[in-house]
Amino acid sequence: MAPACKRHFIQDTCLYECSPNLGPWIQQVNQSWRKERILNVPLCKEDCQQWWEDCRTSYTCKSNWHKGWNWTSGNNECPVGSACYSFHFYFPTPEALCNEIWSHSYKVSNYSRGSGRCIEMWFDPAQGNPNEEVARFYAVAMSGTGLPETWPLLFSLAPTLLWQLN
C-alpha cells in the first residue's frame, strides 16, 4: 500500500477509535466482535476525494473490508479465489471507496470542509475541532428537538396557506 494511501487508513482508525464526536451515528449491533458501530457518518467530500486519489494505485482484493477475510492463518488474508486489483477497480469513484469499504460506516456528504455539516477526517487541533459543531448539529436534527423552534414560523404561515387554498 502506498504511504499516501496508508495515512488515510491510519487517520480513519484514529477517528473511529478516538473521536468523541461520532455519537449521533452509533448504532447497536449484535455481532460476536462488537456491540456498536457507526453508520452513515457524513464524511466531507474533499476528504473522501483525497483518500480515493491517494489510494487509486494501491491494491486490494475486496470492496468491503469489514467482513469476508480469510483468517485461517491468524492474519486477514484475501479470500480464496479473489484477485488483487488496483483500488480503482474495486472503488471506481470516491463515493464507492468511502461508502463501501467499511460497510457504510461513512457516507460521502455533499457538504464541504468548514460547512459544519460534515465530519472532517483531517483538521488542525490547534484551530479547534470542527467535528464538535457537526456532531451537535446532527444530534439535534436526529432527535427532533430542533423542530419546536420552527413552530412560530409554521404558525405564521398557516393563514397564508389557508388563503391560498381558498
Image (spheres, grey):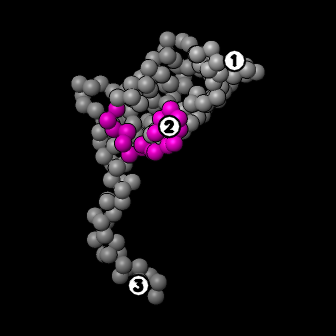
Q: How far apart in space, not on screen, are marks 2 and 1 (Cα)?
A: 23 Å
Q: Residue 39: horizontal and vertical position, in percent? A: 48, 42
- Decide if residue 99 is on the left or right side of residue 89: left
Amino acid carrying label 1: it is Cys
Q: Nearer the viewer, mark 3 or mark 2?
A: 2
**Dot 2 amino acid type:** Ser
Q: Which mark is residue 163?
A: 3
In the picture, the disc for residue 105 is: 2
At x 31%, y 60%, the residue is 145
- Per the image, label 2 sits on a secondary structure element best described as loop
Give the residues drawn in magenta, as a range.
19-35
* Residue located beneath label 1 in the image: 84
Residue 111 is situated, as x and y percent measured from the top left of the image, at 43, 41
Mark 2 or 1 closer to N-term? 1
Q: Is residue 122 above or below residue 32?
A: above
User: For residue 134, which quarter of the picture?
Assistant: top left
